Image: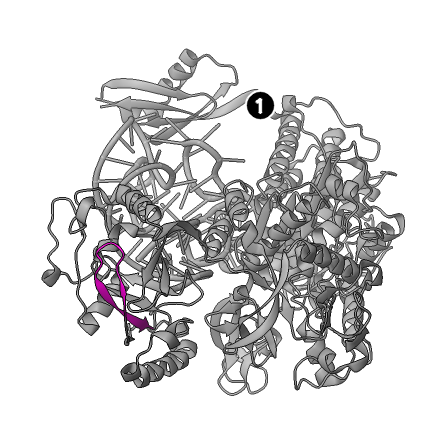
Amino acid sequence: MYILSTSISRNVMVNRPRGGTMEKQYVPKDIEQKWQQKWLQSGTFKATEIFDKPKYYLLEMFPYPSGRIHMGHVRNYAIGDVVARFKRMQGFNVLHPMGWDAFGMPAENAAIEHGTHPAKWTYENIDSMRQQLQRIGLSYDWEREFATCDESYSRWEQSIFLKMFARGLAYKKGSSVNWCPDCQTVLANEQVEDGCCWRCHNLVDQKELEQWFFKITDYADELLDWTEKLTGWPERVLAMQRNWIGKSYGCEIEFPIVDTIEKIKVFTTRPDTLFGATFMSLAPEHPLVKQLVTAEQQEAVSQFVTQVERQDKVERASGENEKLGVFTGSCSVNPLTGEKIPIFLANFVLMDYGTGAVMAVPAHDQRDFEFARKYALPIRVVIQPEGDELVVEQMTEAYVGPGKLVSSGQFNGVEHESAKEKIAAYLDDRNEGRKTVNYRLRDWGVSRQRYWGTPIPIIYCDACGAVPVPEQDLPVVLPKDVELTGEGGSPLARHQEFLKVDCPSCGKPARRESDTFDTFVESSWYFARYACPKFSEAPLDKAAANYWLPVDQYIGGIEHAVMHLLYARFFTKVLRDLGMLDVDEPFAKLLTQGMVCMESQRCAEHGWLYPEQVVDGNCSLCGKPAEQGRNEKMSKSKKNVVDPNQLIERFGADTARLFSLFAAPPEKDLEWNEQGVEGCSRFLGRVWRAVTENLEVIATAEIPAVAEGTAADLRRKTHQTIKKVTEDIDGRFHFNTAIAAVMELVNSIYAFKAGQQQPGVLREALEAVVRLLNPFVPHASAELWELLGHAESVEAAGWPKWDAAALVADEITLVVQVNGKVRGKIAVAVETHRDAVEAAALADQNVQRFMEGKQLRKIIVVPGRLVNIVVS
RNA sequence: GCGAGAGUGGCGGAAUUGGUAGACGCGCUGGUCUUAGGAACCAGUGUCUUCUGACGUGGGGGUUCGAGUCCCCCCUCUCGCACCA
């Protein structure tokens, strides 16, 4: 199609045709639509299991269907698409699916605000977002698409739950749980950040509730061990997971309570300091507190407990750390010294770590030290460092370093590390303690008091208890006729028809579970379901799952470092143990891409301003100067956002993709920059013209095997670029340098003036550019490939290979240094002997100048690089 | 406090194994073409300079013929965890 330049928006590069011929203009909109339709119609990216062909499974974290894509999505999916297209052109059988993490609160909130049913809202958003994603030209196999709210997905999730229930991996217990009063639901520990809800950032309460849990703690060790083997994961993600699992080796010790038969269990990593335990601290919530409190301490204790409860929410989260406590009136006995030691309640002892009780060794634990000083409790040194003597009165802080035991009876003189073993063994013999391992990780609470989630397939019967819904009755479907008001908890709990059911076991009237799953359950196995999204006999088609899994490359945001990525690893191991697949880990390699950032701007009067509301540095509403804010993550609240749809409208998807990939390496934050976008658009125009302006010249040219003169230089550049781009994409993911390399080649093409005489070399260079750019800008690449006269698609043409012979130059330039400073350059033939290289270097005039009056010490020759002449 | 990572021109960034620091892009300067240029093309662009060179990758030391890269000390910043017994 030929277009007059006047009909093109000012942001699209327009080149006035030269030499009278009218070349086809680059109009992104037209060609992008054309190729997107073609790809969809011909199923270019459809994946099929070909069991003897090497596979490559590339996955980006699927989006929540909010209705609109943002630049973070564009970046995430552009990165993934480069790899998918690259691997496909390299001949891999690529699986690159897309779907929707479709359950969750925004749908319910929309229902409450606008009266739209969550299902309607969600599926409409999905339709709209699918269209937006398709406009980016991403190479998905759309036939595998599903939403996690599809009944065909819930059904199999419920089936997995039943199998976990049968194995004891899903169980119900009453416990104190994190309750978000604003979301009106329970939160997992992982979903509480600084004491606040990860979603709405409101303060979280504690509440006693009966909840379903997944026994992730059964897998704590395996999850931890594999963090050492996931070499394709960023270290910081693994570190966060190790930290979260929090495995520590230590000892469980029983302290008898004076005048009772009860004992208090403590966990300690320092049994070597047991002789120094001079008191004991309990969490205020400890179950034995009521028994321990004496009449005279009653009032002080209850006052303290209330105080801590209040402090719990506000101050504990804010990092206030004054050590506070209260005496219970009771004492216990140090099992080694036989000493009576007082039992305190302390604000710094946490009920959900260890046993909720701590033996206090003030000389060797900083918190106990501060506590002891505050309440004038005895401090006893039991570890003496080498070459120093600790004196209690002079200590200003606890000593936590190494040393030998003192004041420790038969263990005196023992080095503290080995004392840990010896004291543990001693306690074990007397049945007063034993070596244990403690984890910070708790079981995963999955019950949510929400409507828009997967129903938990359980029925409560007065006679039979919690009875699983029989497999053949699945799925348990959400009732459509619900009223979402946002008040009084889950609408399912009020929906009589949903609740009323007969017990599958005894047939008597019973009641359905009204809680739904945490939405992280859905995202814990969706990647496996993509292997067989339509399979209707089980959650997974084992053959297909085993073929595709693990995901070779997973790409997403760092914010899921602990929650999603830990749950998904856990689920994979569960599915393996249920016999549904054979892999140990879901994601062989993980890339955590950086955020998309932009400077925020605000007006003193009108608050945050959208970029288009700032004209010449002034607020367009009042004309006052706009204040430059920080460069920070694009967010609606700060209005520092670029709408991908508008961006694509103005520049085209290829430019949007190219900039996202070129401006920064994928794992770093990307600073959005309008001029940078224009630069990328300009580059595509340059590529376009390089091809279209030379079409006639190269029309009948054959690609040569050898070339001479400047043609040989271009040919070498072409093959060097093929090599560099291949290596930069493969494994390194340095897309910015890959693109830079293609830019260099394009610059060389413009500089190549012998096109008329050597059209074959020119064609080879142009075709390399078009093919190398395909993963980045697939539409322009496809169109240019067609213009170059190829009947076969550029995708089918495959990834170009470099000719090793073409890489080698006859003559190379060596740098000549004198004492490490560059003093000259010499041109030598490639195979020149070392002696000749040295001679040539020494002959250089400037080099000689710097050697004058000095004595030659030695000459270092780095083949192909440089010569360093050392003089003194 | 613990853990992970980063610090390079006016800006985004490059330098893969210790071998010409600043590729590529943005911005800026000059030129060509043009009725015009916010288009395109060409050239230049780390700092200082006596134009020869000197200096230059957060700071200081070290190893080396040679250090952005390796080692030691320090500073700054980002992220995560944080009373974990």
* Residue at x-position 32% and y-position 73%: A345
The image shows residue A200 at horizontal and vertical percentages of 56, 76
- Residue A589, quarter of the rendered image: top right
Q: Is residue A682 visible?
A: no
- Residue A120, quarter of the rendered image: bottom right
| Left or right placement of residue A773 versus residue A290 in this view | right
Q: Vertically, is A371 above or below A718?
A: below
| Left or right placement of residue A341 versus residue A753 in this view | left
Q: Quarter of the image containing the C terminus of chain A? A: top left
Residue A112 painted magenta: no
Image mark 1: chain? A
* Residue at x-position 67% and y-position 74%: A105
Residue bearing mark 1: A809
The residue range painted magenta reads: A331-346
Along the line of sight, the residue nearer the viewer: A429 or A742: A429
Q: Is residue A632 visible?
A: yes
Residue A340 painted magenta: yes
The image shows residue A15 at horizontal and vertical percentages of 73, 54
Along the line of sight, the residue nearer the viewer: B45 or A191: A191
Q: Amino acid at mark 1?
A: Ala
* Residue at x-position 76% and y-position 71%: A122
The image shows residue A692 at horizontal and vertical percentages of 78, 45
